[in-house]
Amino acid sequence: MHLPHLELLTPEDEHRIEEVFSSLRERYKDYKDPWGFNLDLCEKTVRTILPLYRSYFKVRVFGAENVQDKPYIVASNHTGQLPIDGAMITLAFAMEVHPPRVLRAMVERFMAQLPFVGDFSAQTGAILGDRGNCEYLIDHGESILVFPEGVRGISKNTPDFYKLRTFSQGFYRIAIQKKTPILPVCVIGAEEMFPFVFHAKKLADMLKVPSMPLSLNFLPLPSPIDIYIGEEIAIPTHFEEETPEKEVKESVFHIENTIRRMIVHGLKNRRPFFDHIRKPISKYVIREFRTKGNT
C-alpha cells in the first residue's frame, strides 16, 4: 500500500530504519511485554514522525557516544507544553544511538487512562510510571525515560521557560535498588514551539486536568530542537534502599544541577528562531508578569 508520508523519507532514512528495526527485532525476539508493546507499531510510528524529527524540528543530538549497551534511567528536563520532548528523545535513542533502543517512557496516570492515547502510548513503549513497572522493565534490560519535574515541567508560563522545577526522588530510589546508572539529558528548543504561554490553573482544576496551557498558537512551531546526552552518573556503591533521605536528596540535587548546567550550555548554543520577534515580546511578557506579581 502506498503511504504518502513515505515520500518524505530519504533513502538514508529508509536504510537507517531498516537497520534499526532489524536490530530491535533481534533484541526483542524472546521478550514478552505485559503492557502490549508492539514493535511493528513502533516502526510505523517512526516512519510517520521521522520527517518531523529531521525536517520540521531539525533535531540535533549531542553526546550519543555516552550511551553504552546497558540499562539506564534516563532523566531529562520536561519542556514545551506538550510531551513532544519525550517523543523526540525516544526517537533520538532509537535512530542516533548504537545499538538502538526503545526508551520506555514513564507517563502520568492521567495520560495512561486517556482513550486511545493510553493504549497507543503503551504499545509504543510508554507505561504508567509506578515503581513496580520500572523495576520489571529494568530487570528485563530496558532503559527508562523519566521526567523528574513531572507535569510541573510542562506547566510553565513564559517567564519560567527553562527553569527547572524541583526533582522528585522516586526515580532515584528505584536506581538505588536496581543499581542502575542515571543518564542526564536536556532538551533545548521545545519551549519555543509555544513561545507565549499562560497556564490557567483554576480552569485546569475545574476540568480536573493536570494543566491548561493557553497559547497564541495551537500547533507547535518548527523550533529547532537540540538534545544533549550527558555522561552517566553512577549510583554510590554504599547506597541501599534504606539510605537516609538527606543523602538521596543530595544525589538527586546533583543530577538536577548537572541538567541545569547542560541547559545553560545548550541555551548559549541554541539556534535562532524568529529571535527578532520572539525576544522583544518575551521580554515584554516577563516584565508584565513581574509587574503583576505572577512570577
Image (cartoon, helix red, strand yellow):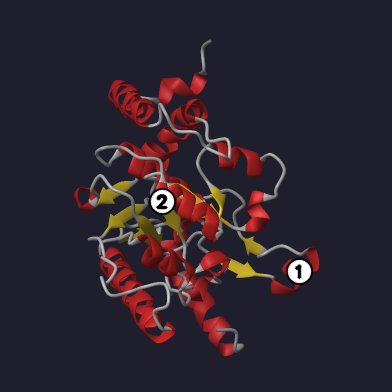
Q: Position of residue 5 (x, y in %)?
A: 48, 24
Q: Position of residue 45 (x, y in %)?
A: 50, 32
Amino acid residing under circle 1:
Leu
Quadrant location, the C terminus: bottom right
Q: Nearer the viewer, residue 288 or 247?
A: 247
Quadrant location of residue 271?
bottom left
| Mark nearer the N terminus (1 vs 2) | 2
Looking at the image, is mark 1 or mark 2 nearer the viewer?
2
Quadrant location of residue 141?
top left
- In the visual, does 130 lie left or right of 144? right
The residue depicted at 76 percent of the width and 64 percent of the height is 208
Could you tell me which secondary element the residue under label 2 belongs to? helix
Q: Which mark is residue 203?
A: 1
The Cα atoms of the two marked residues, 1 and 2, are separated by 38 Å
For residue 182, above or below residue 282? above
Task: Please report contact status of discs 1 and 2: CB closer than 8 Å, yes or no.
Answer: no
Q: Position of residue 248 (x, y in %)?
A: 38, 79
Q: Position of residue 143 (x, y in %)?
A: 38, 49
Kindly give the residue lying farthest to the right in the view shown.
206
- In the visual, does 262 lie left or right of 32? left
- In the visual, does 18 lie left or right of 164? left
Q: Which mark is residue 138?
A: 2
Amino acid residing under circle 2:
Ile
Residue 245 seen in the current view: yes
Classify 10 Å Cα crowding around label 2: few (below 14), some (14-19), many (20 and above): many
The residue depicted at 60 percent of the width and 84 percent of the height is 294
